[in-house]
């Protein structure tokens, strides 16, 4: 039996186990997905131990994505983002990858642009938030050919991220209405909408020719997505990004195409 898993702290409410186990069942794999919750000071030993025990792959979540970067061999994308969310033990040394970026771009392509992988190329995208999710999404969009405008509560943090992301500029959140006016894509990568019934931007700034994605997936329909839909915009909920980052990890570990429909069914059954 092959073992995969998730390392983070806390992990008890993670939706990754049912999603990945649905994938193993659909592909007829003798595999299990388990969770590990080490203390921060034991992360290196946890990763070394997983490797020694023959674990095939790990997902990495809060608060370990940045720390894991120094404990594995990161690929170019993970190195540029500065965070690892997937570890592959298939080589001589564990390798680190960031499938959050891939997941965000695929979610937008599939559900914002009807599967048109070229639609993001040349678009102007506004990313609200310069934290971990915002970093991954900004790099993913830039690599897909978008011009990226990053807005953050602390403007200097947005500007610092923009310096690292190709064709990006940094701004304050107060500039969002003006930025959205010139954009075709808006992504909320902040926690606004997670614990409060609020939107990151005034609904009057939204319009029908926008594609709006919210990285928040609980609730599945945030105030931002409700407002965007009411204005006629295409909306992409955060569960799609969660799904596709998991699918990318599955494909890296197994070499098989991810069964996204069973994975999606298992994910949404628990939201």
Image (cartoon, grey):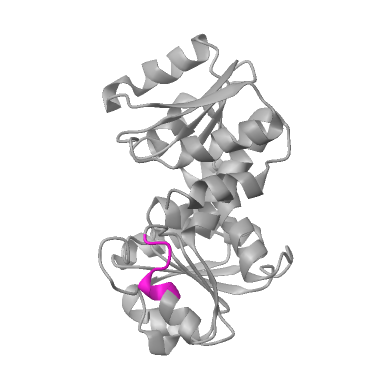
Across and down, in percent, residue 256 comes to 73, 34
Is the residue 39 above or below the residue 116 in the image? above
Residue extending farthest top? 52
Q: Residue at x 44, y 58 (%)?
A: 134
Q: Position of residue 212 (x, y in %)?
A: 51, 73
Q: In percent of the image, x 39 and y 85: which residue is there?
A: 203
x and y percentages locating residue 62 in the rendered image: 35, 40
Residue at the far front: name it.
269
Residue 251 is drawn in which quadrant? Answer: top right
Q: Nearer the viewer, residue 168 or 143?
A: 143
Q: Residue at x 37, y 35 (%)?
A: 64
Q: Residue at x 42, y 53 (%)?
A: 271
Indicate yes or no whether the magenta region holds residue 224.
yes
Q: Position of residue 70 (x, y in %)?
A: 44, 29
Q: Would you say 103 lies left or right of 221 here?
A: right
Task: Give the magenta-colored segment's residue range.
Answer: 219-225
Q: Is residue 91 above or below residue 132?
A: above
The answer to whether residue 255 is above or below residue 230 is: above
Q: Report the side of 164 relative to 114 (left or right).
A: left
Residue 77, picture quadrant: top right
User: How many callouts does the rendering have?
Assistant: 0
- Image quarter (top left, top right, bottom left or bottom right) of the N terminus: top right
Is residue 161 visible in this depiction of the protein?
yes
Q: Nearer the viewer, residue 101 or 208?
A: 208
Q: Is residue 85 visible?
A: no
64 displayed left or right of 105: left
Indicate whether residue 227 is drawn in magenta: no
Q: Which residue is the extreme one toward the bottom?
A: 204
Observer-nearest residue: 263 or 170? Answer: 263
């Amino acid at each position: 039996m092959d073992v995969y898993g998730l390392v983070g702290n806390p992990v008890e409410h993670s939706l990754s186990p049912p999603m990945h186990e649905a994938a193993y069942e659909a592909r007829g794999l003798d595999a299990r997905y388990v969770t590990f919750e080490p203390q921060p000071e034991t992360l290196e030993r946890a990763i070394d131990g997983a490797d020694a025990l023959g674990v095939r792959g790990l997902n990495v979540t809060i608060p370990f994505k940045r720390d894991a970067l120094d404990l594995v061999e990161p690929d170019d994308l993970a190195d540029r983002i500065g965070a690892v969310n997937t570890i592959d033990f298939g080589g001589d040394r564990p390798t680190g990858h960031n499938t959050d970026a891939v997941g965000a771009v695929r979610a937008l392509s599939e559900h914002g642009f009807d599967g048109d992988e070229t639609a993001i190329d040349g678009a102007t995208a506004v990313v609200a938030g310069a934290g971990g999710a915002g970093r991954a999404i900004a790099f993913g969009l830039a690599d897909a050919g978008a011009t990226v405008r990053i807005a953050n509560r602390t403007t200097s943090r947005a500007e610092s991220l923009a310096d690292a992301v190709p064709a990006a500029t940094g701004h304050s959140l107060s500039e969002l209405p003006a930025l959205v006016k010139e954009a075709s894509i808006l992504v909320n990568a902040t926690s606004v909408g997670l614990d409060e019934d609020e939107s990151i931007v005034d609904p009057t700034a939204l319009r029908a020719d926008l594609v709006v994605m919210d990285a928040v997936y609980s609730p599945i329909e945030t105030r931002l997505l409700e407002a965007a839909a009411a204005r006629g915009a295409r909306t992409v909920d955060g569960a799609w990004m969660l799904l596709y980052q998991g699918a990318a990890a599955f494909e890296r570990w197994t070499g098989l195409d991810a069964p996204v429909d069973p994975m999606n069914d298992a994910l949404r059954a628990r939201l």
